[in-house]
Amino acid sequence: MPLSSERDNILRTAVVLIALIAGFAALKIGENIFAPMTLAVVVGVILSPLAQAMERMGLPRGLVSAGVLVVFVLLFAVIAFLIEPLIWRLTDAMPRIRFELRYFVEELRGLIRGLDEVNKEVEQALGTSNGAAKAAGGEEGDVAKSVPNLTDALFFAPVILAQALIFLGTLFFFLLTRAGIYDWISHWSGRTREQADRIRDRFRTAEILVSRYFFTITLINLALGAALAGALALIGLPAPIVWGAVAAGLNYILYLGPMTVTAGLLVAGVVAFNGLFAVVPPLIFLCLNMIEGQFVTPTLVGRNISVNPLLVFVSLVVWLWLWGPIGGIVAIPVLVTVLALLDIFDGDEVIGKHG
C-alpha cells in the first residue's frame, strides 16, 4: 500500500510537470494570440474598479465596458501622440547619432591613452588601424541595414493590427462578463458551495490587489517621470517632457524598461552635449530610479503586497522569455493573482482595510 501511494504521488508530480512544460510551450508558440489576450485581462482587472463605479451609477454594463474601452484607447492615442515626434526625430538623427557615438568612444579612449604599451599590444593583437577603420565602416553599414524601413513596417503592420484587435476584443468582453467568468470558474473549481464562495472571494482579492498595485505604481511612475522631466529641463536636454513620459511608461516593465530608458538617454546625451557631460542624463535617471526602486516602491507597495523578491525575479524572467516586453508587463499581476488564488495573502484583511 505505501509503495502504491508513493508511486501515485510520483505519477501526479510527473503529470503536473508535463502539463507545465506543455503549457509554457503552448504559450510560447501561440504568443501572437495569448500575449494580447493576457494583457487585455490584466488591463481589465486594473480597470475593474472604474467599471464597478460606473455600474453603481446605474449605467448598463455594455455601455460601461464600451466607455472604459474608449477611454483606454484615447489614453493610448495621447501617449502615442506625445512619443511620435521623438521617434521621428531619432529616426532622422540616426546618421548623426552613429557619428556622435564614435566620437564619444574616441574621447573615452583618449582618457586611457597613457597606457601606451598596453595599447600597442592590443593594436598588434587586433591588427592595424586601417583594418579597424574598415571594420568600423562595415559595422556602420550593418547598423544602417538593421534600421527598419517602410517594407519592414508594412510587413509587420497586419500582425500588429491583429494583436490590437485581439486585445481590444478581449478587454471589452472581459469587462462585460468578468463576474460571470469568476462565478463559472468558482463553480467548477469548488467541490462544495463554501469552496466555490471561497474561490470567488480569492478572485475578488486578486482583483483588488492587482488594481491597487497598478494604481500605486502609476502614481510612482508619474512622479518619476515628472522628476526626470524637471531634471532634464534644468540641464537643457531637448524634449524633457517626452523623456519623462517615456520613462514613466517603460518603468512598468521591471529591469528591462529602466535599461531601455538609460540607453535612450545616453544616446540623447551624446547627440545633445559634448564630452563626458553626455552621460549626465542617464546618470540622473539611474539616481532617480534607484531612489524609486529602493525606497519609494517598497514603502508604498509593500503595505498591501509583500512578495519574495526571488519569485518576482523568476516570474519576470519567465514571462520576458515567453512574450518579451508584454511578458514584463503582465509578470507581476499574474504572480499576484496566482498567489492570491493560493491564499498566500490575507485576503480578508486586505478587503477589510481597503475595501
Image: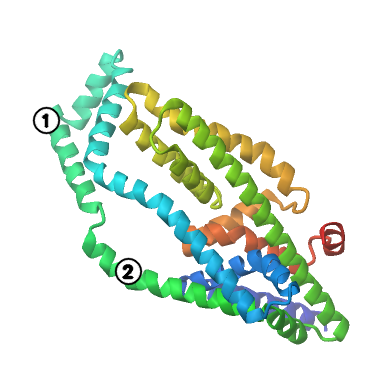
How far from the left and from the top, in percent, is residue 259? 47, 43
How far from the left and from the top, in percent, is residue 272? 33, 31
Mark 2 secondary-structure assignment:
helix
Figure check: 84 above or below 233 = below
Figure check: 145 above or below 274 = below
Closer to us: 30 or 41: 41
In the picture, the quarter occupied by the C terminus is bottom right
Q: Is residue 135 left or right of residue 26?
A: left
How far from the left and from the top, in percent, is residue 135? 17, 38
Three-letter code, disc 1 = Asn
In the picture, the quarter occupied by the N terminus is bottom right
| Camera sees residue 58 | yes
How far from the left and from the top, in percent, is residue 96? 23, 37
Q: How is the image coloured?
A: rainbow
- Residue under the image location 36 percent in, 36 percent down: 268
Circle 2 residue: 157
Residue that protrudes farthest toward the front in the picture: 58
| Camera sees residue 128 | no
Give the number of the disc on residue 130. Answer: 1
Q: Is residue 321 left or right of residue 344?
A: left
Q: Is residue 148 left or right of residue 351?
A: left
Q: Is residue 318 left or right of residue 46?
A: left
Three-letter code, disc 2 = Ala
- Cα distance between the residues tagged 2 and 1: 42 Å
